[in-house]
Image (spheres, rainbow, N blue to C red):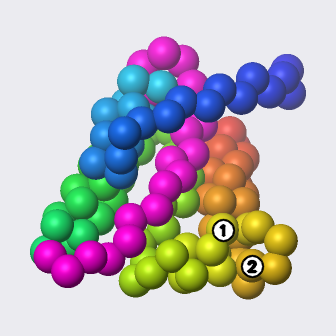
Amino acid sequence: SGAVDVQLNMVPGAFELPLAAKWAFEKGADIVIALGVVIQGGTPHFDYICSSATEGLTRVQLDANKPLGFGVLTVNNEQEALDRSGLQGSKEDKGAEAVQAALAMSALMAG
């Protein structure tokens, strides 16, 4: 019908994104956009969280067979995050790119 019902759900951190995405699909979402930022620290925790979030979201998308836009920034510092955030003066808008990719996949899958 072309109707759009956008719901915003906040999670405590990037590690929780896959479960939230799974829940959203189970509740009837046609598309999920996962947005977040993980900033590199001085420990391997960054690598574990980034890998878990990425692998988890990939699995959720494949299990649901529905588009999931990946807009999780994995950066070295706050400035890199701001440069990719789509805010005024930023160089990129990774959130918008995630939305566009999910919509493109939805159109492809609709046939």
Q: Is residue 70 visible?
A: no
Q: Position of residue 1 (x, y in %)?
A: 85, 21
Residue range corresponding to the magenta coloring: 25-43
Which residue is pictured at 84% across the width and 23% down the height? 3
- The one of 15 and 78 positioned closer to us in this rendering: 78
Q: Is residue 38 visible?
A: yes
Q: Circles 2 and 1: CB distance less than 8 Å?
A: yes
- Give the residue number, with chain letter if any, for mark 1: 85
Gap in angstroms between the C-alphas marked 2 and 1: 6 Å
Q: Which residue reaches farthest top?
A: 27
Query: Crowding at label 2, few (<14), some or many (≥20) Cα neighbours within 10 Å?
Result: some
- The one of 56 and 80 positioned closer to us in this rendering: 80
Which residue is pictured at 68% across the width and 39% down the height? 110
**Residue 105: within the magenta?**
no
Q: Position of residue 2 (x, y in %)?
A: 86, 27
Which residue is pictured at 65% across the width and 60% down the height? 95
Residue type at mark 2: give it. Answer: Ser
Q: Where 98 sits versus 88, above or below?
A: above
Q: Where 89 sits versus 106, above or below?
A: below
Q: Position of residue 96 (x, y in %)?
A: 72, 60
- Quadrant of the rendered structure where residue 92 is? bottom right
**Residue 27: within the magenta?**
yes
- Give the residue number, with chain letter if any, for mark 2: 90
Tell me which numbered mark, 2 or 1, is placed earlier along the sequence.
1
Q: Where 23 sits versus 100, above or below?
A: above
